[in-house]
Image: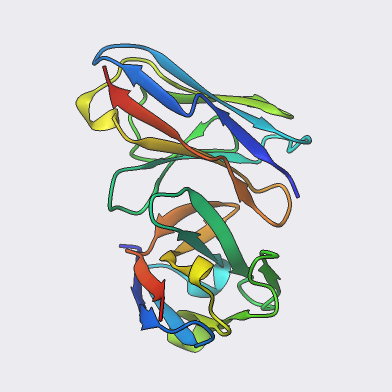
Amino acid sequence: DIQMTQSPSTLSASVGDRVTITCRASQSISNLLAWYQQEPGKAPKLLIYKASSLESGVPARFSGSGSGTEFTLTISSLQPDDFATYYCQQYHSYPYTFGQGTKLEIK
Amino acid sequence: QVQLVQSGGGLVKPGGSLRLSCVASGFTFSDFYINWIRQAPGKGLEWVSCISGTDYTVYYADSVKGRFTISRDNAKNSVYLQMDSLRAEDTAVYYCARALGSNDYWGQGTLVTVSS
């Protein structure tokens, strides 16, 4: 199985900050990686697919990059709605696997 | 608009069974794989199972293989997750999600609690 490792597990930041979350795969997954945002008590929301493609309706301050085993999610200028938990997921091969999550907290 | 509406969660004793349903609308159902993904209380997301759109190919996580069965009825725009031999560690919110690789639309989630 492909292991997905996110870092950091928790990130404290302020409104207006630029933040980056990293996701590493235990083997190459090409660009078959998605990023999700989850607010407490809600279903996850797709932000990025194919590592760098922005899902329709998602603000342009979200961007993704990477290929192979190293990926990043960047939020260029944090807004109050962005404080949530973020997950990466590989869909290169079954079983599809998620990172353990990064909780973005208000500093 | 695309919607996935789930039903069927609840409290069940260890060793018991439960069937989850996910009814889709707003898109051509047979064009899409459907995933089941779960989240234990206070934990991260875990992919559980997947079924393809037309040939009904299925995939399972090792943690549920042999105990859970995914199926679909394209005439009813529905996907099901039959969960047998349930264990305490199966306690989670279960989500169905539309998939073309990534999961772009999700159901509202349904809580399954396995406890005596």
The furthest residue to the front: B116
Quadrant housing residue B35: bottom right
Q: Is residue A77 above or below residue B41?
A: above
Q: Is residue A4 above or below residue A9?
A: below
The furthest residue to the left: A80
Count of numbered marks: 0
Give me the residue at 37% from left, 25% from top: A60
Residue A23: give x, y in percent of width and height: 59, 29
Mark yes or no: residue B8 visible: no
Q: Which of A75/A39 is in front? A: A39
Residue A43: give x, y in percent of width and height: 35, 54
Residue B101: give x, y in percent of width and height: 60, 52
Image side of residue B52 versus residue B88, left or right: right
Give me the residue at 55% from left, 74% from top: B30
Q: Is residue A74 above or below residue B67?
A: above
Give me the residue at 44% from left, 87% from top: B76
Q: Which of B114/B63 is in front? A: B114
Image side of residue A46 versus residue A78, left or right: right
* Quarter of the figure with the C terminus of chain A: top left
Give me the residue at 35% from left, 80% from top: B11
Mark yes or no: residue B108 visible: yes
Residue A89: give x, y in percent of width and height: 58, 43
Quadrant housing residue A22: top right
Q: Is residue A85 above or below residue B3?
A: above
Q: Which of B34/B10 is in front? A: B10
Image side of residue B61 versus residue B36, left or right: right
The furthest residue to the top: A17
Quadrant housing residue B93: bottom left
**Colouring scheme applied when the structure was drawn:** rainbow
